[in-house]
């Protein structure tokens, strides 16, 4: 009989086989055709024999038609007539005569009602039928007994660290308080068994004993086998865990000689039993022992010893591979094969995962990236999205997260493991093997608690209203007024800017995209009034230089409230002895710059430097004349006063750098003016320019990378972790947490502490804690981020505001988190539409391309070819640079979720039909 094989399908179909030596080759090719759905309608099943090929048809068919089809799929001249019989030719170099298998036809193998043949979860199909193109029938129940979770560790090759990682996961679960049944199901080359025996552990009952008892059970009744196993297995616990967790070990066999197993799991799949008899019995045993999780270490390779476990979609399948080409390709093939027969239903089944081991961070970065991309694609093919959805079309966010391989760094200590259980655990612990496997654990650690303290009633409706109101006000925080500047989250770039300038004033660029928080931080600096106080409010101690903040330009979007930037200018002028006429400086500065930009022929670089310095002088209340230039006025002022100038709102003057005048003006500010200020003895003046990145690269066309690199550590880049930290800060600031978190301590939370604190905001998963959904703390940045790994602050705040407002309709139904998963998914759609608008306002060229794609009149599935979206390669390159596009290995293009919904594009996975 034929093996299940992954297909290489060409444009014209599956290529004919190179050689046919026996009925095995014929079976293999017909199996490939069946898997690809390329059987003709009249063909139902195939039975191959050493001298005959039986084709089972729905009804009588002409032999000439059969011959034509055989010639088509096996190659021209493959079928022929010999003595009145139709033969399928085989390769035999011993003779020139046409020889082969006699082709026989039989009719009506299926009943009129279409009763299908029974299929069992094995790699080798007993019958070759057109059903091979379809997955196995799903289990009758969506979960195992008592909600026990089975985790199966498998590898294409041995020696890749499969057993080590299975033990590491079992140990981590037990340390977290979980009850684990650890099964060594490698009946040919056991590993856990030797470790357990070497430790002196009891070995009274084994996996081989269990399947032997199951074979003798009547039909699907595994109660007797479970009873007997439960009488002995409690004596086979490994180690003691202070958490109350435990690991019960089921070795592979009690045999002392090396030999193939007498009975294999495949032998249990007899008629009259559930086709998932093996896994259901293992789950029932786990439930009887009080286990939360059953971890199974399987036989490597394409083995029927492992197939009955791997082909149950309720099992959490974990594949382990190295970066070796053979191991990677074999793993990819196994994932695709198993995904074809038993695909994972997103949200219903546990996600299939891959661990890439023996990865050296210093030398394997490129190989690891390529491997993750390849394996992610394979995992995606094994994933199905249910047809029944809430209409939010956000499943591709989950799919991308669930299909992400895990990297396990190389450690030399793992190459030669000690013999005993405790010694192996010591090595695993010292190497931190389990540290990167958190995303694989089926349940959260017990310290990740959500909600309020015991006995405290929480009004989630009020918390949601608090968050919706506060986050809504912060979406455009610059419009809340300077006087409203209370506390704020100090990100790492601002921490560096302040900490780097404790004893001297800053002269720097703060670069960030629209929505990154430039104007917000400008407002916070102004509200602090002095550099020293700004540092103190940010939690930076030891700043000894005292200088007032003097705004030069401000964004047109900035609302002043009770504090006007002119107040700061007036205060400085008064303190320094220069009193300007109130409310004149701001408009004069703007008008002066507009006049310079509008001047025919523009100004040279020296002229623009003088003009910018004149603007700084005007902000200080200094009068500039022919008798006293701006340079002279500032030099004189610097002998008796200090100041930190701040500039924002440059995009209001230079939305597009569409002229040499604008480019020159901005370039001089970013380079020459900063350089001139640095040249002043004693450096009495600081200057912080808040500017968009695209304006910098547009103005400084040569060496812009060098300029950006100089100030990169001050740039407002929001990484995924920083985005999560902002989400917690906004929620805490809104007084919307069931258990309060001190605002001042959020910056210092570790990554694990941050994730734990956020569980009360949005739960552990995008569903219940034991659901099959993605982790919430991974889902949010994945949904909001672009392909440059950036998440804009404004998108995070808008998402919180929208999700909180949407969650209010669940006030009486969901009481374990502030934000409800359904509301979060719908919030992404609104955030995506807003993202398209805001990016268009920031970058007209990118905005033009986005609007163009929004207007395409036909459906677009992601990934897509450029022809489908009517863009050029140059357009695509620009979008890739901006994080809007990513090009896949197959040449097709992807867009991140934060753009896809606003563009109206569909996900390719969404088009799949659930069987």
Image (spheres, rainbow, N blue to C red):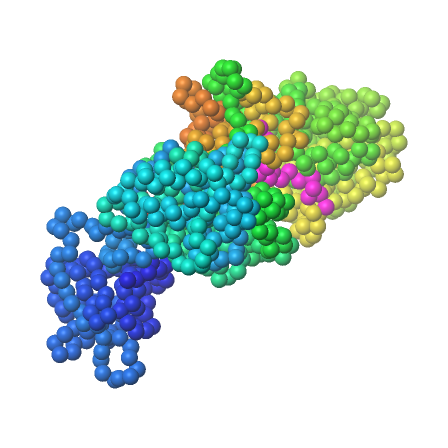
Q: Give the number of callouts.
A: 0
Is residue 421 or residue 859 the one in the foreground?
Answer: 421
| x then y, percent, for residue 52 | 20, 69
What residue range appears in magenta? 710-728
Image quadrant in which the C terminus is located? top left
| x then y, percent, for residue 896 | 48, 43
Image quadrant in which the N terminus is located? bottom left
Is residue 146 or residue 338 the one in the foreground?
Answer: 146
**Vertical arrangement, residue 164 with respect to residue 545, above or below:** below
- Residue depicted at 20% across the width and 67% down the height: 53
Is residue 414 or residue 342 the one in the foreground?
Answer: 414
Residue 400, visible in the rendered structure: no
Q: Overall secondary structure of the magenta stretch? A: helix
Q: Classify residue 817 as left or right of residue 911.
A: right
- Residue depicted at 26% across the width and 69% down the height: 23
Q: Classify residue 657 as left or right of residue 15.
A: right
Residue 37 in the magenta stretch? The answer is no
- Residue depicted at 74% across the width and 30% down the height: 540
| x then y, percent, for residue 126 | 26, 57
Q: Classify residue 867 as left or right of residue 198.
A: left
Residue 114, visible in the rendered structure: yes
**Vertical arrangement, residue 530 with respect to residue 143, above or below:** above
**Vertical arrangement, residue 809 with respect to residue 655, above or below:** above
| x then y, percent, for residue 445 | 53, 33
- Residue depicted at 60% across the width and 51% down the height: 418
**Vertical arrangement, residue 824 with respect to residue 381, above or below:** above
Q: Classify residue 847 as left or right of residue 70.
A: right
Q: Which residue lies most toward the left here?
A: 60
Is residue 771 or residue 217 the one in the foreground?
Answer: 217
């Amino acid at each position: 009989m034929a093996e299940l094989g992954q297909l290489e399908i060409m444009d014209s179909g599956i290529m004919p086989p190179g050689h046919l030596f026996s009925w095995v080759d014929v079976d293999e090719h017909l199996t490939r055709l069946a898997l690809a759905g390329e059987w003709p309608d009249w063909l139902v099943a195939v039975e191959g024999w050493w001298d005959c090929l039986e084709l089972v048809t729905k009804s009588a068919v002409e032999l000439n038609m059969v011959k034509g089809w055989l010639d088509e799929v096996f190659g021209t001249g493959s079928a022929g007539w010999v003595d009145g019989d139709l033969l399928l030719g085989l390769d035999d170099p011993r003779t020139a005569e046409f020889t082969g298998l006699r082709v026989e036809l039989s009719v009506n193998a299926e009943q009129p009602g279409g009763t299908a043949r029974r299929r069992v979860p094995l790699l080798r199909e007993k019958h070759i039928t057109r059903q091979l193109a379809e997955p196995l029938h799903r289990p009758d129940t969506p979960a195992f007994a008592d909600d026990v979770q089975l985790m199966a560790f498998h590898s294409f090759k041995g020696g890749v660290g499969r057993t080590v990682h299975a033990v590491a996961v079992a140990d981590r679960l037990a340390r977290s308080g979980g009850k684990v049944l650890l099964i060594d199901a490698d009946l040919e080359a056991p590993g856990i068994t030797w470790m357990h025996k070497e430790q002196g552990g009891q070995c009274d009952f084994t996996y081989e004993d269990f399947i032997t008892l199951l074979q003798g059970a009547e039909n699907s009744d595994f109660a007797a086998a479970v009873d007997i196993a439960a009488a002995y297995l409690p004596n086979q616990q490994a180690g003691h865990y202070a958490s109350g967790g435990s690991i019960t070990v089921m070795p592979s066999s009690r045999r002392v000689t090396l030999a193939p197993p007498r009975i294999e799991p495949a032998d249990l799949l007899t008629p009259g039993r559930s086709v998932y008899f093996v896994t259901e019995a293992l789950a029932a045993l786990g439930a009887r022992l009080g286990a939360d999780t059953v971890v199974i270490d399987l036989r490597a390779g394409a083995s029927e010893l492992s197939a009955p476990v791997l082909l149950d979609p309720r099992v959490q399948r974990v594949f382990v591979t190295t970066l070796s080409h053979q191991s990677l390709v074999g793993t990819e093939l196994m994932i695709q094969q198993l995904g074809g027969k038993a695909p994972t239903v997103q949200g219903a089944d546990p996600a299939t995962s891959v661990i890439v081991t023996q990865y050296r961070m210093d030398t394997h970065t490129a190989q690891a990236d390529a491997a993750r991309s390849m394996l992610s694609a394979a995992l995606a093919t094994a994933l199905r999205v249910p047809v029944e959805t809430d209409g939010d079309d956000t499943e591709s966010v989950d799919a991308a997260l669930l299909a992400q391989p895990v990297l396990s760094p190389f450690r030399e200590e793992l190459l030669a493991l000690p013999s005993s259980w405790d010694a192996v655990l010591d090595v695993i612990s010292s190497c931190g093997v389990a540290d990167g496997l958190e995303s694989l654990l089926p349940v959260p650690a017990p310290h990740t608690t959500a909600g309020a303290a015991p006995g405290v009633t929480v009004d989630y409706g009020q918390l949601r209203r608090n968050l919706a109101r506060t986050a809504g006000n912060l979406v455009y925080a610059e419009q809340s007024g300077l006087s409203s500047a209370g506390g704020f989250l100090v990100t790492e770039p601002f921490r560096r800017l302040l900490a780097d300038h404790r004893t001297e004033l800053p002269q720097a660029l703060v670069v960030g995209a629209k929505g990154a928080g430039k104007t917000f931080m400008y407002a916070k600096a102004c509200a602090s009034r002095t550099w020293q106080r700004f540092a103190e409010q940010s939690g930076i101690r030891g700043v000894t230089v005292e200088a007032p903040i003097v705004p030069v330009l401000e964004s047109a979007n900035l609302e002043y409230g009770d504090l006007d930037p002119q107040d700061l200018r007036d205060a400085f002028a008064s303190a320094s002895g220069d009193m300007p006429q109130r409310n004149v400086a701001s408009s004069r500065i703007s008008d002066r710059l507009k006049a310079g930009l509008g001047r025919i022929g523009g100004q040279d670089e020296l002229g623009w430097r003088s003009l910018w310095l004149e603007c700084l002088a005007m902000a200080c209340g200094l009068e500039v004349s022919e008798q006293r230039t701006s340079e002279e006025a500032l030099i004189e002022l610097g002998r008796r006063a200090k100041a930190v100038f701040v500039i924002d709102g440059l995009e209001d003057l230079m939305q597009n750098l569409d002229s040499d005048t604008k480019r020159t003006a901005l370039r001089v500010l970013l380079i020459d003016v900063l350089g001139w200020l640095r040249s002043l003895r004693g450096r009495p003046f600081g200057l912080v320019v808040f500017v968009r990145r695209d304006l910098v690269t547009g103005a400084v066309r040569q060496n812009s990378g060098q300029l950006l690199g100089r100030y990169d550590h001050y740039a407002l880049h929001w990484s995924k972790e920083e985005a999560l930290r902002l989400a917690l800060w906004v929620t805490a600031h809104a007084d919307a947490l069931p258990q309060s978190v001190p605002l001042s301590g959020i910056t210092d939370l570790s990554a694990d502490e941050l994730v734990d604190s956020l569980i009360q905001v949005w739960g552990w998963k995008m569903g219940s804690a034991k659901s099959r959904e993605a982790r919430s703390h991974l889902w949010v940045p994945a949904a909001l981020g672009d392909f440059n790994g950036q998440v804009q602050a404004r998108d995070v705040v808008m998402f919180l505001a929208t999700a909180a407002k949407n969650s209010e309709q669940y006030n009486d139904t969901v009481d374990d988190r502030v934000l409800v998963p359904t509301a979060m998914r719908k919030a992404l759609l609104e955030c995506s539409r807003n993202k398209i608008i805001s990016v268009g306002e920031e970058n007209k060229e990118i905005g033009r391309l986005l609007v163009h794609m929004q207007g395409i009149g036909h459906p677009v599935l992601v990934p897509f070819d450029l022809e489908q979206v009517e863009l050029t390669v140059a357009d695509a390159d620009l979008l890739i640079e901006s994080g809007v596009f990513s090009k896949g290995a197959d040449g097709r293009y992807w867009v991140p979720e934060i753009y896809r919904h606003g563009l109206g594009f569909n996900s390719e996975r969404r088009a799949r039909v659930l069987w």
